[in-house]
Amino acid sequence: MALDITGRLHKVFDTEQKTESFKAREFVIETQGEYPQFVKFQLTQDRCDLIENYKEGDGLKVHFDLRGREWQGKYFTNLNAWKIEAEGDMSRPASDENFSQDVPQASAPESNIDSREDLDDLPF
């Protein structure tokens, strides 16, 4: 299940070597809005370094998978990050100024239309 969220980088933790062949690193982002949330994500294996180029306070877009598992009758949920983008790298809509340059201007209506039927060219 692939999801994404934007927010500000709040805290980055050190990489932890969990077993001989598995390492993980956690980080927290703070969401924006009326009720900001602090959301913790996990990076694993070769993705642990994805957070290296960012500092606390940077705006991020985090792409992640929701992972859940059961172990000895207990249930665990992880937000497994697999891609991180700086807020400035995200696609933004063109500004009104740029947009208006690309849109052709409508021409004035023809003045030689004789009947109401000619005005109604809609198929329904």
Image (spheres, rainbow, N blue to C red):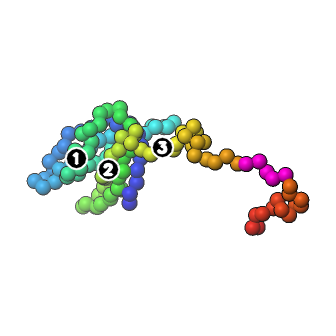
Residue most toward the front?
A: 112
Q: Nearer the viewer, residue 83 or 109?
A: 109
Give coordinates of residue 85: x percent, y percent.
35, 44
- For label 2, the residue is 83
* The disc label shown at residue 117, or none: none
- For label 1, the residue is 48
Give coordinates of residue 119: x percent, y percent.
82, 59
Indicate whether 43 appears above or below 97: below
Q: Are marks 1 and 2 in contact (CB under 8 Å)?
A: no
Give coordinates of residue 61: x percent, y percent.
38, 44
Looking at the rendered structure, the secondary structure element under dot 1 is helix
What range is drawn magenta here? 107-111
> Of callouts 1 and 2, which one flags the residue occurring earlier in the amino acid sequence?
1
- The answer to which image quadrant residue 69 occupies is bottom left
Q: Residue at x 86, y 64 (%)?
A: 117
Which amino acid, mark 3? Arg
- For label 3, the residue is 92
Q: Are marks 2 and 3 in contact (CB under 8 Å)?
A: no
Q: Residues within 10 Å of mark 2 (few under 14, many from 20)?
A: some
Which amino acid, mark 2? Lys
Q: Is residue 88 left or right of residue 115?
A: left
Q: How many marks?
A: 3
Q: Residue at x 22, y 44 (%)?
A: 49
Which amino acid, mark 1? Cys
Q: Residue at x 24, y 61 (%)?
A: 72
